[in-house]
């Protein structure tokens, strides 16, 4: 049977042949590719030569090429253009892929070879890149339980499975609790202050439920504007308490014991693998590679942002008083008065800005920016097969005209596409025997489609989003590494957002906006005072926002640095961790941990600090550009050479210092977010 997924791709640049791939090709291709990947592993384990870097680590990194190619193609498609059939295939192949990866991790012969190479890495003449690859492979086997004794393996496997189930349950409970609440009203007085869009949404929600009037829910599009605009304090209080008590109401969706069990089991796993805490285990390969570093970082930001947070709190409180509020400011008053104050101070909103950011202009401006910074050029190619006619493709060339990458961009929402925006790849870069295999990078987004009368106009937030994803893409496209699993964006979790967030800074620069942002109808340049107000508004309440992020970071670290199982009650545990960041009077019956899906459901355990860490890094990096000129070729060359090209081939801290000439500090971040402003 002919299966294009298993054959050479006779397409321009060897890109995926979307035009001839059929859904029925995937399952057999996965099965076949897993079989041949297993054969390749067998060749490594049955090699009679002494294990060395080349015959073990490098060969392992190169193995499963066909499987990798099919996997990225399939899952990219499943995110950007899915349907029932693809989803069913995903369900069917996921367990096969998990089993295959477990088979590798628990392969004793393979692990023993890796261990041999790992133990002699200091004396065997490896390059830095090879050493890092060896450490990474070794670490992934260790964390997968490869070094455990047979009797421990049983317990390890059972904890892993239990943790997977608990995390799933944790998230399901939150979803259930979020969905179960509604604020139903037929009294139009309840709508006081709400914007039209918010009322419309509530009315259609009621219609959907065959009820009269309006229904408000805890889902963000309904909840957030309600808290920002509703003049009915009693209803804001009800909404807020419902939100804050999710999965903490002593019903069958209560997450108290799930949170405690997850934290305790994580501790047990960490202990089995030889670590003191779970945080110590997961941080090992990060830029902030110990719990102490993370705690020091959080502490430094805490001290630096405390005055600003208190100042923000005070100014909103005074503003509220002037508006006639009496008594204490409660948590459910915060968004309401903040929004009013922001409007008064900056008077800026999306509708005023959008006409200056037509998608067509934004695209050419961003490609032009990359050209200005790095000398690279983009050439449209309409012959490259795509999975949907809307997807645009470019050939990307370096300043010396050598080929760098293919770039796909898929801008608009469709029923089969996930929400949000992301960067991904169909092929990662690697260099095999002097042959530089260049990457295929893709950006997927959900920007408003053009209409008959209007081109696609981006909001300011969408402008920063496309800059962000384009920053990830540059990381993927400019990379020059040897081993695939270290190239491009395959870097430490708390380093990967540097290139992306770095690019967002340009959205606030007059020098860049001036070169392209013009009104799509009148051609008028974006007014200077508008740019100033965008910049100023971006620092509004940043002290408070930083403090809030820190409080989550502290809570996350508290749960993941426990050294013995938690036995006290979750409320006490949480209060102890968060007390120092609390600016409001406490409210009985609310709890953050019970709905903290980032750390108990998703993958942010001992990683929540990463949001702020990345901001501090990108602010420090960009300050180097503002010091030397934002289009300075020397500075951008250094950023490219030391960061964008290097992937994960060196210690991120060393890479950064090579670019910056010194260690990063929090100063630029504090300046950018207005946290160093004096009171008064
Ligand atoms: Zn990102």
Image: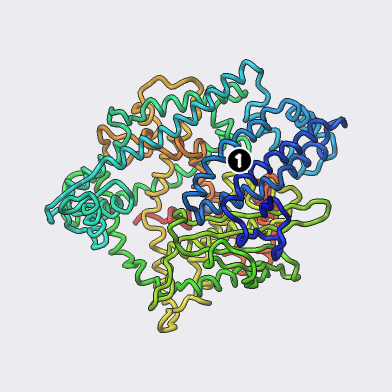
Spot occupied by residue 203 in the image (x, y as percentages of width and height): 21, 56
Q: Quadrant of the C terminus?
A: bottom left
Residue 178, quarter of the rendered image: top left
* Residue 23 makes an appearance in the image: yes
Q: Give the residue at mark 1.
A: 286
Spot occupied by residue 62 in the image (x, y as percentages of width and height): 75, 44
Residue 302, quarter of the rendered image: top left
User: Is residue 248 toward the left or the right of residue 677 in the image?
Assistant: left
Q: Nearer the viewer, residue 342 or 37?
A: 37
Q: Nearer the viewer, residue 373 or 171?
A: 171
User: Is residue 324 toward the left or the right of residue 334 in the image?
Assistant: left
Spot occupied by residue 365 in the image (x, y as percentages of width and height): 55, 72
Q: What residue is shown at x 16% (from left), y 48% (from top)? A: 326
Q: What residue is shown at x 68% (from left), y 47% (from top)? A: 648
Spot occupied by residue 30 in the image (x, y as percentages of width and height): 63, 44
Q: What residue is shown at x 58% (from left), y 50% (from top)? A: 24
Bin the neighbour count of mark 1 within 10 Å (Cα to Cα): few under 14, some 14-19, many 20 and up.
some
* Residue 132 makes an appearance in the image: no
Q: Nearer the viewer, residue 342 or 232?
A: 232
Q: Secondary structure at mark 1?
A: loop
Check the image and report above or below for 109 versus 81: above
Check the image and report above or below for 8 versus 357: above
User: Is residue 211 toward the left or the right of residue 226 in the image?
Assistant: left
């Amino acid at each position: 049977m002919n299966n294009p997924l298993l054959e050479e791709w006779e397409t321009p640049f060897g890109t995926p042949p979307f035009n001839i791939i059929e859904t029925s090709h995937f399952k057999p291709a996965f099965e076949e590719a897993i079989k041949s990947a297993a054969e390749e592993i067998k060749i490594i384990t049955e090699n009679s030569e002494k294990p060395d870097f080349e015959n073990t680590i490098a060969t392992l990194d190169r193995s499963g090429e066909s499987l990798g190619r099919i996997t990225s193609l399939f899952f990219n498609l499943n995110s950007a253009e899915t349907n029932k059939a693809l989803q069913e295939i995903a369900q069917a192949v996921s367990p096969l892929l998990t089993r295959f990866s477990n088979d590798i991790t628990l392969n004793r012969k393979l692990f023993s070879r890796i261990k041999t190479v790992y133990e002699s890495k200091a004396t065997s003449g490896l390059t830095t890149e090879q050493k890092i690859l060896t450490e990474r492979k070794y670490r992934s086997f260790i964390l997968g339980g490869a070094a455990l004794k047979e009797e421990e393996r049983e317990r390890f496997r059972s904890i892993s499975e239990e943790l997977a189930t608990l995390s799933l349950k944790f998230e399901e409970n939150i979803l259930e609790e979020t969905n179960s609440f509604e604020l139903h009203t037929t009294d139009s007085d309840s709508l006081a202050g709400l914007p039209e869009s918010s009322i419309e949404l509530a009315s259609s929600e009621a219609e959907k439920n065959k009820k009269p009037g309006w229904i408000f829910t805890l889902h963000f599009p309904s909840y957030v504007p309600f808290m920002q605009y509703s003049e009915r304090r009693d209803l804001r209080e009800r909404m807020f308490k419902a939100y804050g008590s999710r999965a903490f109401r002593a019903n069958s969706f209560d997450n108290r014991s799930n949170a405690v069990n997850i934290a305790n089991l994580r501790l047990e796993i960490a202990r089995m693998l030889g670590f003191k805490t779970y945080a110590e285990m997961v941080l090992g390969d990060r830029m902030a590679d110990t719990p102490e570093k993370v705690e020091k970082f959080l502490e430094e930001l805490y001290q630096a942002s405390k005055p600003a947070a208190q100042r923000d709190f005070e100014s909103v409180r005074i503003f509220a008083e002037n508006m006639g509020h009496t008594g204490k400011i409660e948590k459910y008053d915060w968004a309401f008065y903040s929004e009013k104050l922001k409007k008064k101070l900056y008077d800026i909103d999306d509708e005023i800005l959008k006409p200056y950011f037509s998608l067509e202009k934004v695209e050419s401006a961003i490609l032009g920016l990359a050209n200005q910074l790095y000398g690279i050029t983009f050439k449209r190619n309409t012959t490259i097969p795509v999975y949907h006619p809307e997807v645009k493709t470019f050939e990307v060339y370096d300043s010396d005209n050598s080929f760098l990458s293919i770039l796909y961009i898929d801008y608009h929402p469709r029923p089969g596409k996930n929400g949000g925006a992301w960067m991904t790849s169909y092929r990662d870069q690697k260099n095999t025997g002097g042959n530089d295999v260049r990457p295929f990078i893709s950006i997927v987004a959900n920007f408003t489609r053009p209409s008959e009368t209007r081109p696609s106009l981006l909001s300011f937030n969408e402008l920063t989003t496309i800059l962000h994803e384009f920053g990830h893409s540059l990381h993927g496209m400019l990379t020059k590494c040897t081993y695939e699993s270290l190239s491009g964006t395959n870097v430490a979790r708390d380093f990967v957002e540097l290139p992306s967030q770095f690019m967002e800074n340009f959205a606030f620069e007059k020098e860049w906006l001036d070169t392209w942002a013009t009104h799509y109808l009148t051609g008028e340049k974006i007014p200077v005072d508008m740019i100033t107000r965008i910049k100023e508004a971006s620092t509004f309440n940043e002290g408070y926002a930083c403090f809030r992020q820190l409080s989550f970071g502290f809570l996350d670290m508290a749960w993941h640095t426990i050294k013995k199982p938690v036995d006290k009650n979750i409320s006490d545990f949480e209060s102890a961790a968060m007390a120092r960041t609390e600016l409001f009077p406490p409210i009985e019956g609310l709890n953050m941990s019970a709905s903290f899906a980032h750390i108990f459901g998703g993958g942010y355990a001992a990683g929540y600090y990463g949001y702020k860490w990345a901001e501090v890094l990108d602010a420090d990096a960009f300050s180097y550009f503002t010091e030397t000129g934002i289009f300075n070729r020397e500075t951008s060359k250094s950023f490219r050479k030391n960061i964008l090209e290097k992937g994960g081939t060196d210690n991120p801290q060393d890479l950064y210092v090579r670019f910056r000439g010194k260690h990063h500090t929090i100063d630029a971040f504090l300046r950018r977010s207005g946290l160093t402003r004096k009171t008064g």
